């Protein structure tokens, strides 16, 4: 059903003609040109890296650090991760700071008011 409407077909004459066209197409598949397969293979070989094609040898595997650099996006990714790490360390070293937020009652905004007693039981057990 499409948007609550039931779709019904009343005319099946077009289906018979279309089915005949499909049957004819299946009976005589299109012929592939003689050079088609050769062109596909040549295109595939042309897109291979040069190390894999030189003399039929396989390129040596990349080192762990090279694969890691490629995985994170090269120098751009490494720079972004380093910046984020440095900011995280700086925030972690400064500790938690209560940030005053202008509220209608000029107080602090408690973002998680239900968490106050969350760890009270575990502190009493120790």
Image (tube, rainbow, N blue to C red):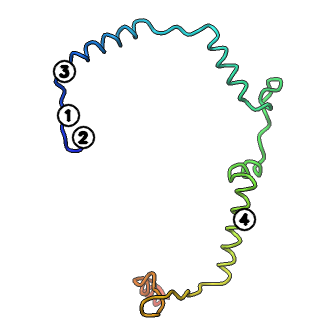
Q: Residue 11 carries which label?
A: 3
Tell me where residue 69 appears, x and y as whole percent: 74, 52
Say what secondary structure mark 3 lies in: loop
Q: What distance separates the C-alpha of mark 2 from that of mark 4? A: 51 Å
Pair 4/3: label in front: 3
Horizontally, residue 20 falls left or right of residue 28, namely: left
State the separation of the CA atoms marked 2 and 3: 19 Å
Q: Is residue 32 placed above or below 109 in the rendered structure? A: above
Q: Residue furthest left?
A: 10
Say which element carries label 4.
helix
Q: How crowded is mark 4: few (under 14 residues within 10 Å), some or many (20 or more)?
A: few
Q: Please tell me which of labels 4 and 3 falls first in the chain.
A: 3
Taking depth in this image into account, of 37 and 120 the one nearest to the observer is: 37
Kindly identify which numbered label has been placed on residue 2: 2
Marks 4 & 1, CB-CB < 8 Å contact: no
**Quadrant of residue 14 within the rendered picture:** top left
Which of pointers 2 and 4 indicates the residue nearer the eye? 2
Query: Which residue is at 77% across, 49% downward?
Result: 66
Decide: is 70 above or below 31: below
The residue where tag 4 is placed is 82
Tell me if residue 73 comes above or below residue 123 in the rendering.
above
The Cα–Cα distance between marks 4 and 1, rounded to whole angstroms, is 58 Å
Which residue is rendered at x = 75% and y = 55% of the image? 75
Label 2: which secondary element: loop
* N-term mark: 2 or 4: 2
Callouts 2 and 1 close, C-beta under 8 Å: yes
Q: Do the numbered discs 2 and 4 sit on residues whose CB atoms are within 8 Å?
A: no
């Amino acid at each position: 059903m499409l948007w609550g409407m039931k779709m019904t077909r009343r005319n099946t004459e077009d289906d018979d003609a279309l089915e005949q066209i499909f049957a004819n197409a299946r009976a005589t598949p299109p012929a592939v040109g003689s050079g088609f397969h050769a062109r596909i293979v040549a295109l595939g070989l042309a897109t291979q890296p040069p190390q894999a094609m030189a003399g039929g040898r396989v390129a040596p595997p990349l080192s762990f650090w090279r694969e890691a650099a490629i995985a994170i996006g090269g120098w751009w990714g490494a720079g972004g991760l380093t910046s984020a790490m440095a900011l995280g360390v700086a925030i972690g070293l400064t500790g938690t700071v209560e940030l005053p937020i202008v509220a209608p009652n000029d107080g602090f905004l408690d973002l998680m008011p239900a968490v106050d007693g969350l760890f009270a039981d575990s502190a009493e057990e120790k």
